[in-house]
Amino acid sequence: MMLGNSFRPLWVEYKRPWKLGSLLAGIGLLIAGSFYYRAPDWDVPISIIMAVVTYLTAPWSLRVVVERRWRYLPLAMFFTWFSVDGCYWLYWRARDPVALALMRDANFPASLSLYAMCGLIWYYNGSLKQLLADARTWLKEKK
């Protein structure tokens, strides 16, 4: 899927080892949190589902806003909603509607914050080596 001239083919970015590593680390933290906090709506499957959907959508959605690709904004907003609330609603509606009713309002702000942070982490298009080189160049220019 490629939208616009500056949108790289997404599959190239999805396969970056540093991005996959950070996704796996995040999933690990989410799974650990599901055992530690024992919230009625926080389990292993939803941790994996929401993390993977976020991985697939957050950087693209952020890029739409940053690059002012307004014609794609409705799709970016849908992806954001689906990642933050839609897949959560589908899962818990099927699994335990009581947990959904109890926790949905609390889940939304936390998930939206995580979605934005993940979008920022995975926004950069390039290898980790390129990211570090660009960061060094940027820091030198700021001195």
Image: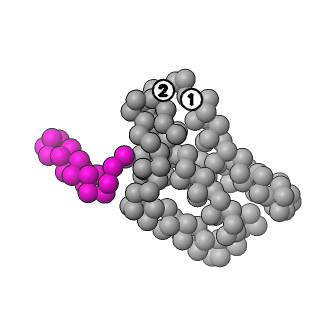
Which one is nearer the viewer's eye here, 117 or 70?
Answer: 70
Residue neighbourhood size for the residue with mark 1, other residues' Cα within 10 Å, grouped as few (<14), some (14–19), many (≥20)? some
- Look at the image and give the residue range highlighted in magenta: 125-143
**Residue 42 shown in magenta:** no
Which one is nearer the viewer's eye here, 89 or 38?
Answer: 89
**Mark 1 and mark 2: Cα distance apart in space:** 7 Å
- Element type at marker 1? helix
Residue type for callout 1: Leu
Q: How many numbered circles are shown?
A: 2
Residue 2 sits above or below residue 27 on the image: above
Q: Residue at x 37, y 46 (%)?
A: 124
- Element type at marker 2? loop
x then y, percent, for residue 37: 65, 72
Residue 36 sits above or below residue 46 on the image: below
Q: Is residue 52 left or right of residue 128?
A: right
Q: Residue at x 47, y 49 (%)?
A: 11
**Residue 132 shown in magenta:** yes
Q: Quadrant of the C terminus?
A: top left
Kindly indicate whether the residue at mark 2 contacts the one at mark 1 (C-beta within 8 angstroms): yes
Residue 60 sits above or below residue 42 on the image: above
**Which residue was labeled with disc 2?**
69
Residue neighbourhood size for the residue with mark 2, other residues' Cα within 10 Å, grouped as few (<14), some (14–19), many (≥20)? some
Residue type for callout 2: Arg
Q: Residue at x 66, y 42 (%)?
A: 81
| Residue 109 seen | no
x then y, percent, for residue 27: 55, 66
Q: Main secondary structure of the magenta part?
A: helix
**Which residue was labeled with disc 1?**
73
Q: How is the image coloured?
A: one colour
| Residue 35 seen | yes
Q: Residue at x 31, y 57 (%)?
A: 128
x then y, percent, for residue 98: 86, 60
